[in-house]
Image (cartoon, rainbow, N blue to C red):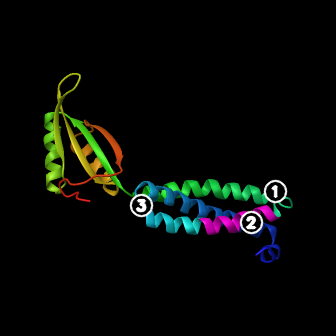
């Protein structure tokens, strides 16, 4: 491999190292998210690919670092870009499940419940007291892919007069339409 790399122009080697590092770190980010979400087999496959790319990249860096400090710079740029792309890609893929806790007055709670019934979504409503008035908490568990759209539509429905807390769900069992 080192013979092939020495036959290339140093700028091409820098670009190859940067691109490989971007791919490696993007894979690493997705692998970590999949491990956290319990997708062990997929995480292991991504880990294998990550490790293979890392081995190639680091051997290139170590064998030529003394001759080409630009290579280290491109390695670092690739790392940073890979982190950014990995997190952006994971956000777009939206792996996992989210929990929404919506706190609203009676009128908005009725609107939210109607919205959820129309879409055949499970929910639980708890009665409570706010600092000024009686409030309700609507508890919803749904795929993370649906969170942005659901929140946007509920906020429009309630005129932005709903307090929202969103969190990740690592494990759940049972529930209306949510058996896992």
Q: Which quarter of the picture shows residue 164?
A: top left
70 left or right, relative to 42 = right
Q: Which residue carries the number 1 mark? A: 69
Q: Earlier in the sequence, mark 1 or mark 2?
A: 2
Q: Is residue 14 visible?
A: no
Image coordinates of residue 49 in percent, x first then y, are 57, 69
Q: Which residue carries the number 2 mark? A: 59
Q: Which quarter of the picture shows residue 7?
A: bottom right
Query: Around disc 1, counting alpha carbons within 10 Å, would you say few (fewer than 14), some (14 to 19), or many (20 or more)?
Result: few
Depth-wise, is mark 3 or mark 2 nearer the camera? 2
Residue closer to the observer: 155 or 10: 10
- For image coordinates 50% across by 60% down, the residue present is 31
Q: Main secondary structure of the magenta part?
A: helix
Q: Secondary structure at mark 1?
A: helix
Query: Measured along the vertical axis of the image, is residue 133 above or below residue 178?
Result: above
Which numbered tag is attached to residue 93? 3
Query: Measured along the vertical axis of the image, is residue 16 above or below residue 169?
Result: below
Q: Secondary structure at mark 3?
A: helix
- For image coordinates 82% across by 73% down, the residue present is 6
Q: Are marks 3 and 2 in contact (CB under 8 Å)?
A: no
Q: Secondary structure at mark 2?
A: helix
Picture quarter with the N terminus: bottom right
Magenta residues?
Answer: 51-63
Q: Is residue 104 visible?
A: yes
Q: Earlier in the sequence, mark 3 or mark 2?
A: 2
Residue closer to the observer: 114 or 5: 5
């Amino acid at each position: 491999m080192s013979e092939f790399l020495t036959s290339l122009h140093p700028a091409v080697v820098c670009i190859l190292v940067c691109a490989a590092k971007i791919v490696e770190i993007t894979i690493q980010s997705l692998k970590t998210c999949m491990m956290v979400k319990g997708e062990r087999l997929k995480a292991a496959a991504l880990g294998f690919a990550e490790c293979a790319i890392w081995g190639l990249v680091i051997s290139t860096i170590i064998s030529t670092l003394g001759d080409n400090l630009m290579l280290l710079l491109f390695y670092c740029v690739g790392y940073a870009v890979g982190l950014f792309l990995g997190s952006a890609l994971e956000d777009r893929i939206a792996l996992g499940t989210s929990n929404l806790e919506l706190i609203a007055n009676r009128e908005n709670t009725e609107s939210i419940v109607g919205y959820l019934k129309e879409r055949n979504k499970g929910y639980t409503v708890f009665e409570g007291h706010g600092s000024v008035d009686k409030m309700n908490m609507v508890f919803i568990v749904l795929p993370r892919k649906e969170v942005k759209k659901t929140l946007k539509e509920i906020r429009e429905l309630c005129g932005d007069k709903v307090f929202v807390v969103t969190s990740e769900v690592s494990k759940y069992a049972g529930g209306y339409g949510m058996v896992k």
